Image: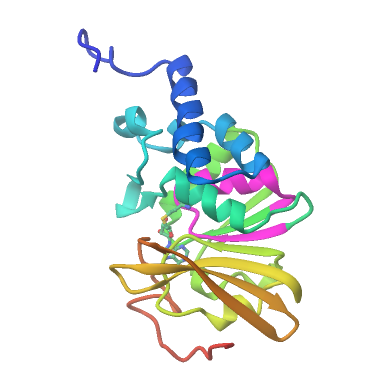
């Protein structure tokens, strides 16, 4: 902590860069993330631009941070882990559910051809859209709405990333995956704890693997919590 006049403890750009490189070494590489493209983009992308002024000094800490509307920006390791496990390719079309701060969205924009992202709060969607255009991303389309139903108009997607927890795997999302080799990653469980699952599609066959125990904010919506109707047939 630097003592002195007001604002003296706000890190400089150079300090942010130093912390960011340290984050990649100590939080990502040390824990086994080794996808070069994911590591490179996380070395480059200014996470501090995606959090409120009061959280900037903590932007490269090993933790999720609060954003507006009581939501969170995911922990850097979780962002890296999910991005790596999706095996993103430059020609992929991706659907992200839960835009939030737009940090994960920016990473998807760097690693793939086009990203559709859905957020239920228009205030978050607008702020994320503004940030992403300031950072000159033009391969993204942010929609305001209930992402638990996916975005059927633009389907199919090579990859789907869900960053809010669902009580069970929404079949409607599975059906929006590319028929051969489509992949989706999502947290499934209750409010307290979930399992991060990786779904792979091969025609009408879907396989599911559990990767990690995680804790995400709940998805609110038709196939999420609270307003869920529970009438969505499971695909498997
Ligand atoms: N990837 C984001 C994480 C945001 S937290 C980031 O790193 O910043 C999860 C987000 O999902 C929240 O912004 C929340 O508002 C959003 N969300 C919750 N239910 C949703 C729904 N049904 N449709 C779309 N977004 C939803």
Nearer to me, 121 or 45: 45
Picture coordinates of residue 59, whole percent (x, y): 39, 33
Please indicate, yes or no, whether residue 156 appears anywhere in the rendered image: no
Which residue is drawn at the image coordinates 46% and 46% (left, top)? 77
Q: Is residue 44 above or below residue 137?
A: above
Which residue is drawn at the image coordinates 36% and 50% (left, top)? 72
* Colour scheme in use: rainbow
The question of residue 41 being in magenta is answered with: no
Q: Quadrant of the N terminus?
A: top left
Q: Horizontally, is 87 left or right of 189 in the view?
A: right
Picture coordinates of residue 33, whole percent (x, y): 56, 45
Q: Is residue 79 above or below residue 222?
A: above
Q: Quadrant of the C terminus?
A: bottom right
Nearer to me, 68 or 88: 88
Q: Report the span colored magenta.
A: 93-114
Ligand 1, by image quadrant, is: bottom left
Picture coordinates of residue 224, whole percent (x, y): 41, 75
The answer to which quarter of the image holds residue 226 is: bottom left
Q: Can you name the residue that lies furthest to the top here?
A: 4
Which residue is drawn at the image coordinates 57% and 40% (left, top)? 132
């Amino acid at each position: 902590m630097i003592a002195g006049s007001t604002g003296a403890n706000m890190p400089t750009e150079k300090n942010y860069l130093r912390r960011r490189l340290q984050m990649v070494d100590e939080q990502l590489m040390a824990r086994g993330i080794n996808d070069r493209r994911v590591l490179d983009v996380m070395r480059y992308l200014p996470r501090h631009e995606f959090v409120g002024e009061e959280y900037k000094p903590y932007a490269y800490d090993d933790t999720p941070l609060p954003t507006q509307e009581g939501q969170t920006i995911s922990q850097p390791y979780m962002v890296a882990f999910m991005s790596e496990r999706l095996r993103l390719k430059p020609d992929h079309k991706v659907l992200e559910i839960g835009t939030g701060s737009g940090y994960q969205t920016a990473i998807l924009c760097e690693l793939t051809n086009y990203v559709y992202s859905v957020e239920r709060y228009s205030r978050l969607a607008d702020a994320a859209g503004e940030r992403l255009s300031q950072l000159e991303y033009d391969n993204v389309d942010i929609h305001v709405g209930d992402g638990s139903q996916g975005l059927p108009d633009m389907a199919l997607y090579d990859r789907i990333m869900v960053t809010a927890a669902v009580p069970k795997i929404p079949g409607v999302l599975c059906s929006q995956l590319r028929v051969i080799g489509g992949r989706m990653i999502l947290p499934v469980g209750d409010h307290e704890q979930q399992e991060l699952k990786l779904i792979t599609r091969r025609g009408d066959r879907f396989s599911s693997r559990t990767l990690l125990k995680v804790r995400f904010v709940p998805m609110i919506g038709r196939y999420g919590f609270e307003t869920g109707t529970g009438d969505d047939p499971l695909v498997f």
